[in-house]
Image (tube, rainbow, N blue to C red):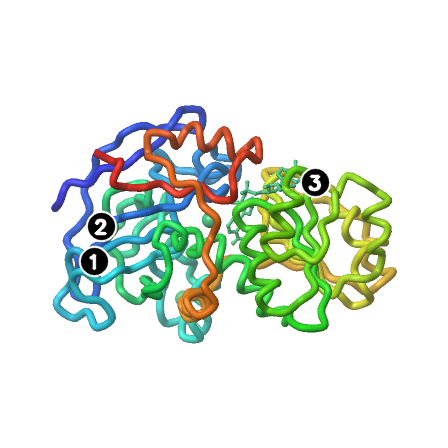
Amino acid sequence: MPASKGYATLDAKSALGPFNFTRREPGPTEITIEILYCGVCHSDLHMARNEWGNSVYPMVPGHEIVGRVVAVGNSTKKFKLGDIAAIGVIVDSCRHCPPCVRGEEHFCDEGVTLTYAVPDRVDGSITVGGYSSNYVVDERFAHTVPANLDLAAVAPLLCAGITTYSPLRHWKVGPGKKVGIVGLGGLGHMGLKFAHSFGAHVVQFTTSLKKKKDALKLGANEVVLSSDPDQMKAHTKSFDFILDTVSAPHALDAYLPLLKQDATMTLVGLPEVPPSFSVFNLITRRASIAGSMIGGMPETQEMLDYCGKHNIVSEVEVIPIQKINEAFERLLKQDVKYRFVIDMSSLK
Ligand code: NAP
Ligand code: ZN
Ligand code: ZN
């Protein structure tokens, strides 16, 4: 078994530090990827600090992975040695339940295998994430990457990208629709880029006035400071769809009155404390609150291909792995434009 290196946290309160472990040799349909870049998702921070109460340690986070194929099993079809491959939040599923057969592996009836901190379906070990030198995965759960895109800026597409692309497609965001994106962070800036690219009228909600210029540059038609009640009121009953990407507790009641009759607000952000809201804000317009989680394998590939065709990537700040703890702190202060990506060549 080849020796692997990574950065792990040993408990909810510790900083991440160097960690040695092993990965298995690839099985017949598996590939080994040498990781080139890994994005830093806010979920990595929630998980590292056990904010959802289900963390397992030691934990190597990371699920926005782009790398080079350095070993293949004897029956792989999609990848060969030297190819670029990408992995997101899911590395396995039962593969035979109705959602898996439909390509909606994220809704697997038996539960998905996440990229880190859950039991591996093949060998029962705990999965070790992408803040590491390599990954072994079945090629069914790896994606090809359009050749024209910058690889560091592709990495965040594997979580932030698909998590916003999927609900915007599902709720048919496009020309003639007025769409709100709440929060301009890693997910939010990808939601903004996609909604703009799909031809909608996009309103970016933010708590950070200093991000206004960037939001307009990234494709927002309007930017609203969500803490200003007058700016919010001006949009009453006007939205077809709102996508909420916020990572911290916040008031949904500020947004629900902005929905048109029969419109939907979809939550993808996962704050530690569950949100509360007034039912009156739903019944008075027959509005819906919904949720959405990443996306299945076919839709993730569709999203990557769409990005290749339309030249869409994430705005990134590339960091060495040694800066990961500082990056977590900066993420909490909303001090990132707009996704940290680890250059894994820094992992010596
Ligand atoms: P992020 O880069 O930290 O962005 C979160 C944004 O939320 C911030 O940039 C900020 O935007 C806003 N925000 C932060 N604190 C706030 C507060 N107290 N009140 C109001 N707004 C606040 O995080 P991310 O990586 O995009 O992840 C966002 C959330 O999505 C996390 O909870 C993550 O776990 C979750 N997530 C869910 C899925 C899924 O499948 N559903 C997948 C990935 C991530 P402004 O400065 O513009 O206000
Ligand atoms: Zn993520
Ligand atoms: Zn399944």
Between marks 3 and 2 in the image, the one whose residue lies nearer the viewer? 2
Between the C-alphas of marks 3 and 2, the distance is 39 Å
Percent position of residue 191, x then y: 58, 57
Quarter of image, res 305: bottom left
Can residue 157 be seen in this snapshot? Answer: yes
The residue lying at 81 percent from left, 62 percent from top is: 238
Depth check: give the residue in front, 254 or 345. Answer: 345
Quarter of image, res 60: top left
The residue singled out by tag 2 in the image is 34
Can residue 109 be seen in this snapshot? Answer: no
Compared with 238, 42 (above or below) is above
Q: Does mark 3's beta carbon lie closer than 8 Å to ligand 1?
A: yes
Amino acid type at mark 1: Val
The residue lying at 33 percent from left, 34 percent from top is: 321
Percent position of residue 167, x then y: 58, 63
The residue singled out by tag 1 in the image is 69
Percent position of residue 2, x then y: 13, 45
The residue lying at 47 percent from left, 32 percent from top is: 328
